[in-house]
Image (cartoon, rainbow, N blue to C red):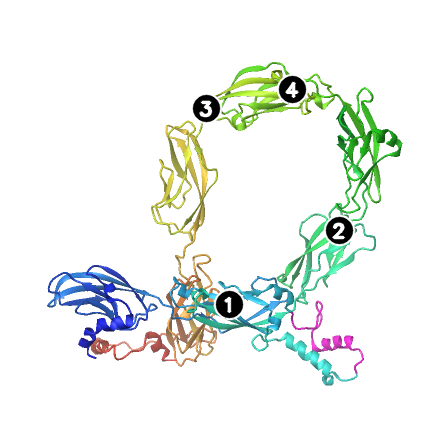
Amino acid sequence: MTPMVHLLLLPFLCSIVGGTNLEEKKGPFVNTELDVPEGTPVPYAVYQFQVTHAGVNGFRLSGEGKDIKVSKDGWLYLEKPLDWSQDDQYILSVEALADNVVVDGPVIVTINVLDVNNNAPQFNQSRYTATVREKTSSGVAFTRVFASDRDDPETANALLSYSLVSQIPNNHNILMFQIHPDTGEISTTREGERMLKARAGIQYSRGEDRSIDALKTKFEEFCPVQKIPYEENPFFTCVERAELRRRNVDPLEDPDYTLIVRAQDMGGASEMSLSGNTRVHIVVQQNLWVNPGPIPIKENLKGEYPQVIAKVQSNDPDAIYSLVQKERELKFPFQITEDGEILVTEELDREDKEMYILVVFAKDGRGNEVDPPLEIYVRVEDVNDNEPVCEHEESVFEIQEDEPVGSLVGQLLARDDDQEGTMNSQLTFAFEPQTASTASSSFVIDEASGRIQSLRFLRRKEQQVYTFSVRVSDSGFSTVCKVVVKVIDVNNEMPLFEKNNYGNHTLTEDSPVGSTVLTLKATDADDPDSVSSLIEFHISAGNDGDVFKVETDGNGVGHLVVAKPLDFESSHTYDLQIDARNPEPLMKGLEYGGESTAVLSVCVTDVDEAPEFSLDILDVTVAEDITKGSVVFKVEAKDPEGKEISFKMDGDSQGWLELDAATGEIRTKENLDREKLETFELTVIAFETDNPEKSSERVVHVRLLDVNDNVPKLIETQTFICMQDIKPIVIKAQDGDSVPFSQPFTFAFVKKSPNWELRAIDGTTAEVRLKKKPIKEATIPLYIDILDSAGLGVTQLFEVKVCNCTELGHCYIPPQGQGFKPGLGTIIGILAGVLGVCIIVAVVAIKRSSKKSKKKGLNEEEERNAIM
């Protein structure tokens, strides 16, 4: 099909291929932004310009994108599908022509290439190996897989979700492992934590020989009568093979479990998701490091000390054990032997301490932990070694006369220091026989609680005081408590103020809290030794905001004091009413009157106060890429008297911020940089504009949030390798950002090389290895893409010099010899020759550039690799 026919049929072909109404793709001849999916079938109609200028019979297109064309009737179309991974945007210029003369335009056309999901996730390793110990806690990751997707990281096309496809073996359909769908971290399930078992093996103690001869000795301990040589004994050879296999297990060749792990893009939520798979080979290791607690020990246990109470065993038979107490108290009656036996060194007393927390460490000879520390609980069990104790030497109770039968007299309080909730501390109460006849005729005591009640009406004229004893007992001991019961008069007299109007009083609003306003006095004619004569004062009216309170000792004297800061602007007058009351209820038919109430007035005078901030604690969190001139925070304050205030700021050591003195707004005047300073403090001062001495200040805590504004960079960009001894090269990158915008990094060649391979080591380093032996010296540039965990990065040049090396491993540099010195004529001849060669090379380069579409030359890396 000729180009002309192609253009004539373009609308028809586009409508068939695109399945779209072409009328929706037409529009005016103006600056336009268009979205085009990558990989569309071609020809693909993008947009038709509608030109109002008469006589337009053609269009001219210039700018990016050689496969984007425009037809004479204004259709912008594609000759080849676009590829988002090569370029995600094209900017073009379009001019309208009349007989090849520009009559309209140019207009700018921006074509955004939309990513489609055409790249499957790829794991950075085809096979992983890992080890996990028995009883590893569920949810704690012991290894991790990592996959990447070349689609647009800003879309769901590159959003990866990890899942566990299968577990081999999978006995009884019980999964022992799980994988985090977002991070790829692999951990045990709850079933795996309980059920994972390592291969059975011989256990060795610290420093014990683990040779074949030692294995023979252990074999004889179990099978003492053996007359067959070890080499011919099938039982021993079986044990020997099993032990050697356990010691030298290869996760790839002989794993205990193999996991098939899948990574799906689009979050795994679509049937159209693409996926990649890998395998994780897992070996289960023995976990002898088991917590033996909690350990119970009887208090005051008799016997010889030290005594063994438990034993621990490290997974490393050469581990060195140490023991400390978590609470770090002075007394620590425990030790540990070199074989892991935990000893108690003396008798323990539960009343002194009922629980010890021991921390056991297992370390190697260099002091490194070989197993995580164990917290072992030692519980001291109670024995009945404490007798009951009366809370008071003499318990005194009062009861009004003529109280109804069954009225509460009081509760006798006693304690037992043995363990609560056991028979050792369970107390019983009973009247002592010597006083039982007197007490039991008037009172009864509850055997379990010590609660004393009256059995009859009591009258002061018959007996004012009753004295008796109560025996308090536990399962093995008892003690006697003395009890005194006083029969008191009923409350038939009311408190009387010395005067009922205490007049007017004046306070400044800055009067300190706790200062006394005045002293009140009242009396009560009831029995002075009874609760009926006690007097309490209550502010019953006028105390808005509970600004005042009355302090009293109950003997009729009260002090009116300031309880909260005064504020003239809130209230400048308080008309208080104060009542005098007995804690004991009045006798029936009697009510309090005006003689038990006093009034007074308190006036508050104004004081010029400093401005007050609305908040006591000011914390600000802001992203480091906030636009210059943006408001970071606004401090608010006001003057209690309503005076005009201003603000000023101290502490901005970087000169990043500025404060509006009138509004309190803090704005950025320079770009913030978290990598330079992550947190800092500002002091904001609010002061009266006309009286700056009246001021208050607050500290503003500012924390900058990280944004991904740094890319990983190589720490070193060049090195050398020796032709005689080719060794892998370790490259390392660093990123000024913090997690999650930094490591782990991904390393990849921009273009796959037949001579070099690149393999990640950990989150920041990778290994570059030369696969073929070089035949001559050269300096080879390697272009490496380094991306951070968020997918941000750039291509970086890493140069490797291949050279002959000295015996000490340094590049050999030929000595500078004394060559001949050419004369002037020779030099002119050489320059003329060089000039001629340059002209020839320029001509050849021009001709080759015209044939660029027909012949593709080697790039710089391929030319240099050609020497390998």
State the separation of the CA atoms marked 2 and 3: 63 Å
Q: Position of residue 513 (x, y in %)?
A: 55, 27
Residue of label 3? 607
Q: Position of residue 301 (x, y in %)?
A: 81, 52
Q: Are marks 1 and 4 in contact (CB under 8 Å)?
A: no
Q: Amino acid at mark 3?
A: Val
Asked if residue 219 lies in the magenta stretch, the reply is yes
Instruction: Tell me how many marks there are.
Output: 4
Query: In this view of the protein, which residue sits in the foreground, 815 or 585?
Result: 585
Query: What's the residue at 16%, 62% (across, down)?
Result: 51
State the separation of the CA atoms marked 3 and 1: 71 Å
Residue of label 4? 591
Q: Are marks 2 and 3 in contact (CB under 8 Å)?
A: no
Q: Amino acid at mark 4?
A: Glu
Q: Quadrant of the C terminus?
A: bottom left
In magenta, the rendered stretch is 197-226
Closer to viewer: mark 2 or mark 4: 4
Q: Are marks 3 and 1 in contact (CB under 8 Å)?
A: no
Q: Amino acid at mark 1?
A: Ser
Q: Assess disc 4: are there few (<14), some (14-19) or many (≥20) residues with their C-alpha within 10 Å of its C-alpha.
A: few
State the separation of the CA atoms marked 1 and 2: 48 Å
